[in-house]
Image: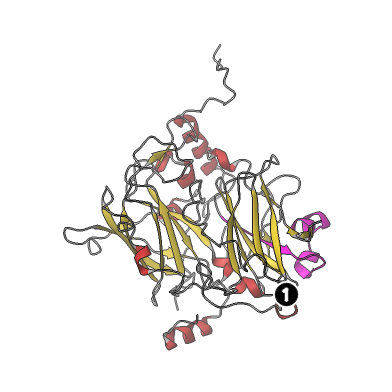
Amino acid sequence: MLTTTSTSTAPALVPQEQVTAEITEAHAATPPGAAQPRIDFPPYRSSVLRHPTKDLRHADPEGIELVAPVFGHSDVDPVEADLTIQHGGDPIGERMVVTGRVLDGDGRPVRHQLVEIWQANAGGRYIHKRDQHPAAIDPNFTGVGRCLTDADGNYRFTTIKPGPYPWRNHHNAWRPAHIHFSLFGTEFTQRLVTQMYFPGDPLFALDPIYQSITEQSARDRLVATYDHDVTTHEWATGYRWDIVLTGTHATPLEATFDDQDGEDHR
Amino acid sequence: MTATLEPTPGQTVGPFFHYALPYDGGAHLVPPGTPGAVRLHGTVYDGAGVPVPDALLEIRQADAAGATPRVEGSLARDGRFTGWGRAATDAGGRYAFTTVAPGGVRGGAAFFAVTVFARGLLDRLFTRAYLPGESDAFLAGLAPEDAATLQVVRDEAGDLRFDVHLQGERETVFLAYPRHRA
């Protein structure tokens, strides 16, 4: 018999080749130009029962949806932007700075808004009770950071380059190294959670989560750029990654006034 | 004029957000025991009707009088009502907020704006949780069975119950706003 004879209740994990073929098939079946991931993406097994099957309903944002929550200096301590100083010693791995601008779809800076990140350590291990990957936990690295964008929409973190890690979506499944980002715009409708990747990762083609974005140019927007001007002498490598949220419903005229008076409207 | 920029695509919140996004007091928009406080709670289900233990909900709401809060302090509330909260689901797929029932903003229907994140969900989802008896043109434009998925139920304990079905027969209606690009 060619079928599995395993008596385990857990189904055997399919090989990478099969998942890669499923990715190719899903891409071929998706019209070009998609800006967002396909939420029904069977190569990502966990998505199968967790995506809505009906079209999203178009709604005009009202009242509370047009205003984002406000975060300020009472919420976030500036030291939270440095993930390498949260414990008694230096974390293991490549120290790096990740910085960039957060903009809305009209190119306006998203000012004084909360940016949250979380990530695995250099060995690809999260400090999470459900992460059972047998890589070392780094006692000097939690992998959680926060900051506020400045008046020009810039964010900046100092951290450690995360490692890739296995995740059991299929046999020999490995996630490309990534940092999770959580972002707020000036409206509740701009909320975004995404992942930043590193240039040239050999795991890109194999990863169903990254490949759930079927358009190459859209996938490329998740990849940071190595920036030697961000790299600092004998201290840290530097990466730049800009983030674009959806457009707001504010008129361009209002934006002009915002830009001119310079200060935030918290 | 600046051309419209291409949006950064979303990605799943993944399974390991629990030590990063939830925080002490995140689900308490008002302190428990506050006069007039209600529990907004429910369960997140997948397409097989199984509770989702690694989901996260955020709500944005007006105060009881329908005023929109614009004050900082959602992470370190210090007694401030900021109209925003965050709650992860537990092992049984349940979430709960302690808050006040919102008023309608500028004469509109009273609802909680809700964002749903989960492992397995490749992009966040927006929805609305309308208070019992509230309606507006959007809700009225839905088929009754769809509208029912957006209606909060007052349960036997007097709390507000709002279940989220990511998929299935009772699939929640999820929203796209103008300027969102699929």
Q: Quadrant of residue A88?
A: bottom left
Which residue is pictured at 55% across the width and 38% down the height?
A: A45
For residue B149: magenta? yes
Question: In which quadrant is the N terminus of chain A drawn?
Answer: top right
Residue B30 point in image, percent of width and height: 63, 69
Which portion, as a residue range, is magenta?
B124-150
- Residue B142 in view, yes or no: yes
Q: Quadrant of residue A10?
A: top right
Q: Nearer the viewer, residue A16 or B22?
A: B22
Q: Does the magenta portion include A229?
A: no
Residue at x-position 28% and y-position 56%: A96
Q: Is residue B156 left or right of residue A201?
A: right
For mark 1, name the chain.
Answer: B
Between A151 and A17, the residue placed more toward the observer is A151
Compared with residue B27, is residue B69 higher up or lower down, i.e. above or below? below
Query: Residue A266 location, x and y as percent?
Result: 50, 80
